[in-house]
Image (cartoon, rainbow, N blue to C red):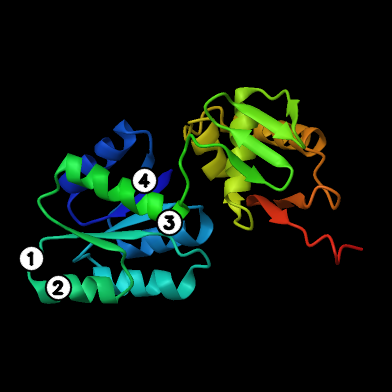
Amino acid sequence: MRIVALDDQAEGLDLIKETLNAVGHECHVFTNGASLKRELQRGTIDLAIVGWQLPDITGPEMVRWARSNLKDRIPILFVGNCHQERDIVEGLASGADDFMAKPIRAGELTARVQALLRRAYAESPTAPQTWGRYRFVPLSGQLEINGRSVGLTRKEFDLSLILFRNIGRLLTRQYLLETIWRTNNPVGMDLMSRSLDTHISRLRSILELGPGAGYRLIAVYGQGYRMDAIDVGIVS
């Protein structure tokens, strides 16, 4: 999952980033609200961690901005030095989903983040999942269409699954490259981006996406891709 963390303490941010990267997430850190706002508006984010007191905005103000301006309601975890009940109440009332008091403990952080992700995205990462005629079996990397096994490479399978798991949600190119190709290094990014486009083109053909399938894969110019469900009753 792609996670962002905002705090004014570099040491705390380093611990958050190291902890979450170690369990397989991609964590990006920010030290002011303005830079995080820009990232939230242009990127695809699965979860945000927000500190309490920041150079240009308070944590509750940041959360209220996110709830008012973002299309996707991503889970938000507050992290702060606040221990009094009124502070926790204020944080949760602003729209946060959970609150964790400093000092940050790696085990607790991991547990809270994983719990928020499970609640928000409500799926087992390994359980078979079905959308219409498409059935995904993550453990074996197997896709069935109308009960017929379809041969996909592991990257094609992972890319297909993440698109179906996020139907109706725009997934930026950067998000897909970080999540599927595990890279955010500018060196070689153009090559990986072309590889992404090639995979998308193949998937449109292999999955037979279109009105008859009930799903279509949309390219959003300059941003990324989105899988949409089609109401077959109104498609012209």
Q: Nearer the viewer, residue 209 or 135?
A: 135
The first of marks 1 and 3 along the sequence is 1
Marks 3, 2: nearer the viewer? 3
Image point (74%, 27%), residue name: 150
Q: Which amino acid, by three-letter code, is at mark 4? A: His
Question: Residue 6: where, in percent of width, then height?
Answer: 29, 56
Q: Nearer the viewer, mark 2 or mark 4?
A: 2
> Which residue is identified by label 2?
87
Cα distance, mark 1 to mark 3? Answer: 26 Å
Picture coordinates of residue 113, whole percent (x, y) = 30, 49
Residue 120: mark in rendering: 3
Q: Quadrant of the N terminus?
A: top left
Residue at 86% x, 49% y: name it.
212
Q: How dense is the environment of label 3, judged by Cα within 10 Å: few (below 14), some, or many (20 and up)?
A: some
Residue under numbered circle 4: 28
> Extreme right residue here?
236
Give the CA distance from mark 4 to mark 1: 26 Å
- For marks 4 and 3, the one nearer the N-term is 4
Indicate whether 85 appears above or below 179: below
| Callout 2 secondary element | helix
Kind of residue at badge 1: His
3D distance between C-alphas at marks 3 and 2: 24 Å
Dot 1: element:
loop
